[in-house]
Image (spheres, rainbow, N blue to C red):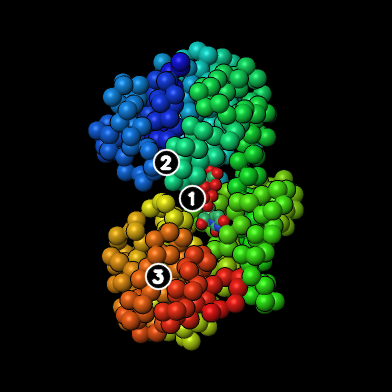
Amino acid sequence: MSRIGVIGAGYVGLTTAACFSRLGHTVVCADVDEAKVSALGRGEVGAHEPGLAELVAEGLRSGRLRFVRGNAEALSEVDFVFLCVPTPTGPDGAADLTAVHAVLREARDAVSPGCVLVIKSTVPAGTTERVASLVGRSDVRVVSNPEFLREGHAVDDFLRPQRVVVGSEAEDAARRVVGLYAGTGAPALVTGSASAELVKYASNCFLAMKLSYVNSLAELCERVGADISDVTEGMRLDDRIGSAFLEPGPGWGGSCFPKDTRALLSTADEVNVDFPLLRATIGTNTHQAHRVVAMVRDAVGHLAGARLGLLGLTFKAGTDDLRDSPALAVAALLAEQGARLTGYDPCVDTDCGPVRVLDSPDAVARDADGLVVLTEWPEFAELDWPNLAAAMRRRVIVDTRNLLPLDKVTEAGFHLVSLGRAAA
Ligand code: UDX
């Protein structure tokens, strides 16, 4: 078992730290935020991530997991340091690497001989090889090991990954990093560092492209009288296409897809590679929010002064994350056109921009001119439709997740508009 330092106790860092301690390693997890470090030390996990709080508690109890403020302890006296610091989108769309650079500079004088520095933060292809010079020590290797964690499934994705990808020009260092995951039984792929970095972008951008494709296909279905559920069901039977990521929606969002699509496009621009598919993937997603707004306007008849209840605000179900949420993009456009918005989300209890957040679907339905389903929380499929219908001023629902039971909703007297199929 190894000694591991993790820099950054955000969603990726904390999952990495807690899961490596579960796998038997001894982990020191560092963050600059004093309050966060103290809370984590008491076992208080702010993030809404199934299983994570239990793993943190177990790690603290066993003594294999510690949280510290500042990076010094997590850099010295460890065999591996995982960099899990943010790489947000900079003003030009490229990933901002300031935090990664700062940690590597600090590592130069702090790490023990033979230590392997592992970049888990999502960084553009070519970064790992380029930044190794910031460390400038022949005994210390810098290796890429991208993460593929889905919010809401992060613990499971870490402990039972579909693949572990490690990129390095030094194969022995890469193999040592692969060894840390021995307990997971995952297939490992060892590549050059630029390839490993690109696997992450290539995967996320491909998935975003698949979703933009399906969202355009849904628009087409509406025009030609086809049903998107039937079309995607037919596509799913072809295992070259695969069965996941074929649900139309209000657009893709979250902390990864918007950032990673822009960053890959920026990389392509830098090296003079034209990547029209990627540009169209992003453009289609921007269009999708406008399209949803037009659907609501057509269904309700007008937006200025309309009272609309939004069901779901997070970027997907199973998380409390509002970052780059398509629901909020749609809300902003609706508000711009004069709609008055209330919203309900099982994981959100404070107002979000123009949306006054209420505590139940019943409350948002009261006197509303329409409901708009924006996040696929399963409980929305189980609502009391006759009750909601009685509370509303007009019985209109736009379901951007195709989640609601058509028969029950229409039986209650609603006009239901969904994506990619005839309105009912
Ligand atoms: C994603 C990647 O899946 C993960 O591998 C990577 O490490 C981080 O980014 P996450 O951001 O948690 O994970 O979201 P994901 O579950 O992939 O969903 C992304 C977006 O696509 C959401 O807005 C979701 O609602 C949307 N989506 C997904 C659809 O609209 N339809 C689908 O069929 C699937």
How far apart are the alpha carbons under marks 1 and 2?
Answer: 11 Å
Asked if 167 appears above or below 321 in the picture, the reply is: above
Of the two numbered discs 2 and 3 in the rendering, the one whose residue sits closer to the viewer: 3
| Residue 186, percent from left and from top | 57, 29
Give the mark, 1 or 2, whose residue is nearer the N terminus.
2
Where residue 154 appears, as percent x and y from the top left, is: 46, 40
Q: Amino acid at mark 1?
A: Ser
Q: In this view of the protein, which residue sits in the foreground, 263 or 321?
A: 321
- Residue sitting at 36 percent across and 77 percent down? 386
Please say if the residues under marks 2 and 3 sit with CB atoms less than 8 Å apart.
no
Q: Earlier in the sequence, mark 1 or mark 3?
A: 1
Element on which disc 1 rests:
loop
The quadrant in which residue 328 appears is bottom left
Residue denoted by label 3: 310
Question: Identity of the amino acid at label 2?
Answer: Tyr
* Residue indicated by mark 2: 11
Is disc 1 in contact with disc 2, using a CB cutoff of under 8 Å?
yes
Q: Nearer the viewer, residue 290 or 383?
A: 383
| Residue 231 seen in render | yes
Residue neighbourhood size for the residue with mark 2, other residues' Cα within 10 Å, grouped as few (<14), some (14–19), many (≥20)? some
- Classify residue 234 by image quadrant: bottom right
Q: Is residue 95 left or right of residue 9?
A: right
